[in-house]
């Protein structure tokens, strides 16, 4: 950690040299990603402004330069952080789109599977109704109480037709 000896700086030349030292440090830490180093130089520039005597002509101008350097150092840090956040926001938006697209595809596939199964039920029940109707006709020609058998078949046909109607509503 650098110790600045503010009480040992003399005259405008001394304060100019000190500010140059701080600006060199700011340039050096601005080139790396170490936030703690940037904040350390920022604090030193602030200390420069606090400790520089207003009684020396020209020191006020040095303070303006120090304040500007402080601002630029933090703006660079904030800008980099905002850039990183912006990148992560874009990544999130891309992933959200991918997840939405995958979910939509999954819903479409699931719907297609359900519809295919329902269609098979409808087709199968339609064929069953036709076969049972044909059986009812043939049973009518039997000599053993064909009315009871035909009545049972009629109830089965009715139940299957009701099922097919309900499944068709889904499709």
Image: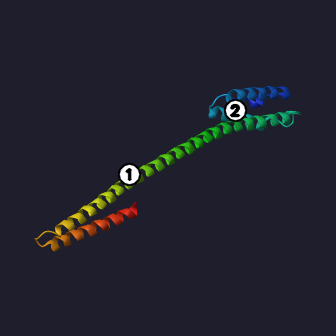
Q: Camera-side residue: 46 or 117?
A: 117
Provide residue 4's location: percent of width, then percent of height: 72, 29
Q: Camera-side residue: 21 or 74?
A: 74
In this picture, residue 36 sits left or right of residue 135:
right
Instruction: Using the rendered view, name the quadrant where residue 44 is placed.
Output: top right
Disc 1 element: helix
Q: Label 2 vs label 1: CA separation?
A: 65 Å
Q: Earlier in the sequence, mark 2 or mark 1?
A: 2
| Residue at 74% in and 26% down | 24
The numbered disc on residue 30 is none
Provide residue 36's location: percent of width, then percent of height: 63, 34
The residue singled out by tag 2 in the image is 41
On the rendered image, what quadrant is the N terminus found in?
A: top right
The residue singled out by tag 1 in the image is 113
Provide residue 7's location: percent of width, then percent of height: 77, 31
Q: Is residue 108 above or below residue 11?
A: below
Provide residue 18's location: percent of width, then percent of height: 77, 27
| Residue at 27% in and 62% down | 130
| Residue at 27% in and 63% down | 129
In this picture, residue 67 sits left or right of residue 157:
right
């Amino acid at each position: 950690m650098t110790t600045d000896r503010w009480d040992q700086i003399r005259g405008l030349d001394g304060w100019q040299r000190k500010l140059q030292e701080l600006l060199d440090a700011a340039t050096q830490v601005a080139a790396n990603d170490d936030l703690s180093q940037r904040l350390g130089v920022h604090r030193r520039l602030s200390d420069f402004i606090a400790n520089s005597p207003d009684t020396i002509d020209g020191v006020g101008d040095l303070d303006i330069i120090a304040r500007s350097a402080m601002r630029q150092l933090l703006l660079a840090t904030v800008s980099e952080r905002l850039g990183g956040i912006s990148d992560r926001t874009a990544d999130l938006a891309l992933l959200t789109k991918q997840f939405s697209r995958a979910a939509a595809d999954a819903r479409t596939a699931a719907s297609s599977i359900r519809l295919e199964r329902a269609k098979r039920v409808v087709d199968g029940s339609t064929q069953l109704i036709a076969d049972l109707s044909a059986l009812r006709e043939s049973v009518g020609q039997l000599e053993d109480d064909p009315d009871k058998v035909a009545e049972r078949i009629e109830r089965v046909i009715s139940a299957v037709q009701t099922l097919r109607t309900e499944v068709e509503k889904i499709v």
